[in-house]
Structures are given as C-alpha cells and as structure tokens.
C-alpha cells in the first residue's frame, strides 16, 4: 500500500451504527444511508463518507473516482463459524451430525496432513469467500498444525482480517487426526506465537467439541485462554440431540453440556459456540452473563436435520447471536444465503428475520460479538476498508424485483431472498479490490 493510495467510490452506501431492533422499521439512529454517496478510502482505511454532493468539493484534485451508481456498498460480510477444510465435502448426502462426522468429515480432514493440500485448499477457500462478499471469517482448520500455517499464510498474503485455529481433539476420532493434550497445546502455542496479532490475523483456540477432547485437554485450553485475554475461542455446543446424550455419558460430573466448557474456563467474551439449538433459557442466560456468542448456522442446521434455532429466546436472554455458514455442513458460503435460511428457520418458529436485522448481523453485529468492531463492520472514518459492492440488478429476476422496490429495506430483503454470488460485483479488503465479478 503506497502513501498516496487514495480513491473514492460513488454508490449507494448503507451501514449500521447500532442494532436496528426487531421491528419492520429500524430503530432511530441505527442506520446510516446515503442514496448517492461517496466512500473515500486511503491507505487501506476509510477516510470519509458522505453524500457525494457534499464530499466532492473536499476531494483532492485528480483523485480517482470509481462510479458505482446503481449499486449498493455495505461493510464486508463476516462469517463467525466455518470449516475451510470441509470445502470439498459440501453437499455430501444424507447424514445427521455424528454419522456425517465419521463418514465424511474425519476422512476428509486426514488429507490436511499434507502441507501442499492445505495450501491449495486455503487459496480455493479464500477465493470463494471473497467471491461471495465475505471479508472476515472465524475458521476451523484441521488438527494438523500445517493446515493452520497454510491458512494464515494465504490470508496474510491477501491482507485479510481472519481468525482461525488448529483443531484440538485427542479422542473418538481416527488416530491420524488425534493429538494429545500436551502436544496439541504445544502446537497451539507455537501457532499463536507465529500468527496471532500479525497483520490482521487473530488466533482462535479450537477444541472441536466436548466429545473429542478429554477433560485434560479442555482444562489445558482454558489455561492458555486465561494467560492471554486477546485470544478467541471457537467450538460447538448443543447442535444435535444425539450429541447431548453422548456428552452426558462422557462427562457425568457436569450438570449439562455448557457446564463441561464452564468447568474448564472456556466461556468468555471472545468465545463462539456454534449452533446452540438445544439449550434451555438458563443456559442461554449463563452464556449471556459471560458475554459469549452463539453462531446461528441455519443452512447447516436444516441440512443435517439438527433443529430450529430459537433466535428470539437467545435475544431475550441478552445473548449475542452471530450468523455463520458452517460449511461443510452448511450448503452455501454466501452470507446472503445464510440470511435466506435464517429467515426460513424464523418463519417456522414464528419469528421472521427482517432485512435490517439480517444485514446488521452480517456486518456490525458479527463484528461486535467477535470483539472486532474497532476494526471492521461499519463504514466510518478510521475503519479498515473492507466492503462489498452489491448489484441489485445482477440477475434478470433480481432486477425485476428490485425495480419495484419502494425503499432500501425492500431492496435488502430482495437481496436476502434472491441474491447469490452473482450479486457481488466487487469485494474490497484492506483497501484493495480483491474480487471483481467477471
């Protein structure tokens, strides 16, 4: 990035300054919207944004202006839970969670012992994420340290803000995937030293889920977490009823599934628990008290038959909710597809998701829950220049629908329901255009 790397994008701009609430009309002061806006970026950050007519007189003479009128710029999408190592087993037929792990996931992840394979899949995964407008993700690697090295290296080369970690698992999996409590922690500490806080990278401690870690491994992970408050943690919780029964057998001393993690000190403000479908309100309250978040993975939950996430119960408990693809159980990397599935799950529960709440969740909501709101999630001066250029007329059907939109809210909802990777005209990360459709 050169000192004079400065340009302006002219387009419709949309960003959130606060949670818009659950009403059809967003809460006052929660939305920042410029119908004909200017986004001035300089040296990888946002310098200013405003109505184009107001900002234009302040622009330096001769500055590059990229004309995207007719398109919509929002902050880059954030995916709070995804497995890059499962990219090639998406759309594998017909299993619920535990069988799916044994039949598809574990054999696939064994391939990541080979560094060259991990490097190839890291690049392919990042290409796909940028193609669908996702600029930040919290990512599961495999249990092989090389899989994390490869992913962090690929992300660093592209100057992406990414969170990731090597999976910790020392039982109930093929020998080729199992580490041991001390060896897994040694590998993790080396990876933290090499990558955490380097550029825009962060490390997430990653025990896969309680059944594949012994108490000794969970306790050791909690020790690392207590020693460095800047680390993140990601794992799974209460996704499937068979999983709950298994956890109860493996940890009879724990009063419930969440307590397994609590007893090892793994529940904190930087902890993401994927799924959380089969929780009671008291458990949601315990998560909320510690500032943890639940990653809502609707397409995965539907595909694996895991259940219907109760979004409003989580919100009533004061619990942070994030939105996630959960590929490979999820059926699409696109954040728009995640919102579509979340709306459908909500309809079945009688709690439909508004477009305002959905786009807030994919951007500032996810950033806040992941403690990243100081860097990404908003279009605002000083923020990192990670954003997506959406085309509301990307397909003939979408163009027909959005041509009849009376409000920006209707256009957002149409993008949620009808949009896909074709709706992403450009994806910018670190102030650079890193994907352009076509």
Image: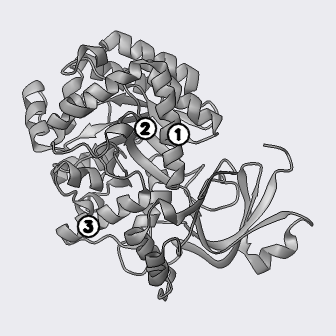
- Location of residue 418 with respect to 233 vertically, above or below: below
Circles 2 and 1: CB atoms closer than 8 Å = yes
Q: N-terminal of the two: label 3 or label 1?
A: 1
Mark pair 3, 1: CA separation: 29 Å
- At a point 36% along the width and 73% down the height, the residue shown is 354
Towards the viewer: 90 or 143:
90
Tell me the crowding category of disc 1: few under 14, some 14 to 19, or many 20 or more residues within 10 angstroms, Cα based: many
Judge left or right: residue 344 versus residue 26: left
Identify residue for label 1: 162
What number is the disc on residue 139? 2
Give the quadrant of the C terminus: bottom right
Identify residue for label 3: 344
Mark pair 2, 1: CA separation: 8 Å
Residue 380 in picture, x, y percent from top left? 65, 61
Mark pair 3, 2: CA separation: 25 Å
Circles 3 and 1: CB atoms closer than 8 Å = no
């Amino acid at each position: 990035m050169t000192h004079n790397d400065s340009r302006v994008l002219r387009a419709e701009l949309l960003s959130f300054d606060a949670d818009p609430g659950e009403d059809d009309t967003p809460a006052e002061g929660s939305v920042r919207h410029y119908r004909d806006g200017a986004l001035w970026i300089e040296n990888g950050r946002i310098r200013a944004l405003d109505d184009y007519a107001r900002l234009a007189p302040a622009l330096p003479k001769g500055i590059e202006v990229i004309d995207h009128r007719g398109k919509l710029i929002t902050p880059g999408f954030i995916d709070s839970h995804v497995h890059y190592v499962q990219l090639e087993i998406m759309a594998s037929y017909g299993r619920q969670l535990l069988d799916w792990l044994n039949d598809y996931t574990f054999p696939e992840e064994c391939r990541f012992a080979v560094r060259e394979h991990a490097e190839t899949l890291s690049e392919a995964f990042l290409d796909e994420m940028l193609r669908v407008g996702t600029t930040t993700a919290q990512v599961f690697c495999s249990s092989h340290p090389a899989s994390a090295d490869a992913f962090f290296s690929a992300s660093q080369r592209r100057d992406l803000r990414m969170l990731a970690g090597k999976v910790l698992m020392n039982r109930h999996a093929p020998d080729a995937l199992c580490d041991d409590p001390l060896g897994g922690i040694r590998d993790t500490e080396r990876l933290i030293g090499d990558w955490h806080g380097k550029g825009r990278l962060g490390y997430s401690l990653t025990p896969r889920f309680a059944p594949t870690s012994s108490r000794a491994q969970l306790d050791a992970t909690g020790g690392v977490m207590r020693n460095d408050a800047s680390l993140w943690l990601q794992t799974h919780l209460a996704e499937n009823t068979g999983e709950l029964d298994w956890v109860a057998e493996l940890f009879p001393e724990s009063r419930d599934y969440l307590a397994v993690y609590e007893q090892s000190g793994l529940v904190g403000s930087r902890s993401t628990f994927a799924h959380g479908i089969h929780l009671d309100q008291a458990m949601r309250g315990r998560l909320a008290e510690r500032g943890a978040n639940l990653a809502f993975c609707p397409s995965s939950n539907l595909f694996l038959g895991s259940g219907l996430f109760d979004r409003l119960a989580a919100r009533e408990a004061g619990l942070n909710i994030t939105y996630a693809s959960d590929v490979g159980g999820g059926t699409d990397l696109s954040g728009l597809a995640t919102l579509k599935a979340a709306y459908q799950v909500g309809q079945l529960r009688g709690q439909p998701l508004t477009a305002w709440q959905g786009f807030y969740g994919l951007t500032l909501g996810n950033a806040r829950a992941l403690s990243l709101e100081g860097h990404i999630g908003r279009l605002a001066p000083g923020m990192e220049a990670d954003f997506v250029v959406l085309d509301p007329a990307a397909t003939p059907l979408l163009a027909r629908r959005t041509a009849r939109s009376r409000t920006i809210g209707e256009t957002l909802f149409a993008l949620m329901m009808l949009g896909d990777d074709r709706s992403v005209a450009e994806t910018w990360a670190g102030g650079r255009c890193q994907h352009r459709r076509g």
